[in-house]
Image (cartoon, rainbow, N blue to C red):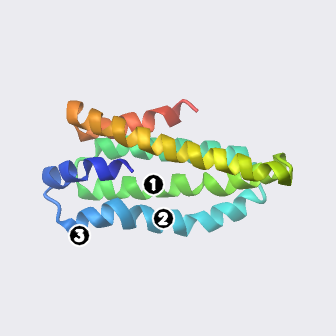
Amino acid sequence: MIIAVVGESIRQEFGLSDFQLGIMGGAAFALFYGGVGIPLARLAERVNRIGIVATATALWSLMTILSGAATGYIQLLLARMGVGVGEAGFTPPVVSLIADRFPPERRATVFSMIAVGVSVGGAIGVLAGGWIAQTYGWRWAFVAAGAPGIGL
């Protein structure tokens, strides 16, 4: 979501075309998120799901921070792909953990709480990211977005 806030600043700094910005902001993330999600879901059926979630969160957070350190388009594109891989490792194991740990009559409520958390967190992230980008620059918006996940 942070790309929506800082995309224009990135486009200007790196001299990107609208097409390049679209690839970096959408396709680079989405293709890796979708392409890696199914294999990671299968892996979550066989190994420690909490370990997958922890590793995925660390990767996603690190790659978000590295997005802010990118010195050019290719580095940023690779970091965005890494974010997609990291985020792909989060949802399947979490859904599986919820199914195991909560009775059927409680699962809808738990899934709803996660959905609300993602939506509210995304909204707060966009607002905070906009302020950080405006005050400190787009790179620091990525650092701020990725830093909390490193501590988890």
Residue in the picture at 54% in, 41% down: 58
Residue in the picture at 56% in, 65% down: 36
Label 2 residue SS = helix
Residue in the picture at 53% in, 67% down: 34
Label 1 residue SS = helix
Residue 48: x and y in percent read 75, 48
> Which quadrant of the figure has residue 124?
top left
Amino acid carrying mark 2 in the image: Phe
Residue 136 vertical placement versus 85 (above, below): above
Q: Would you say 20 lies left or right of 103 here?
A: left
Residue located beneath label 1 in the image? 82
> Which quadrant of the figure has residue 54?
top right
Amino acid carrying mark 1 in the image: Gly
**Which is in the foreground here, disc 3 or disc 2?**
3
Point out the tag, 3 or 2, that comes first from the N-terminus: 3
Residue located beneath label 2 in the image? 32
Point out the tag, 3 or 1, that comes first from the N-terminus: 3
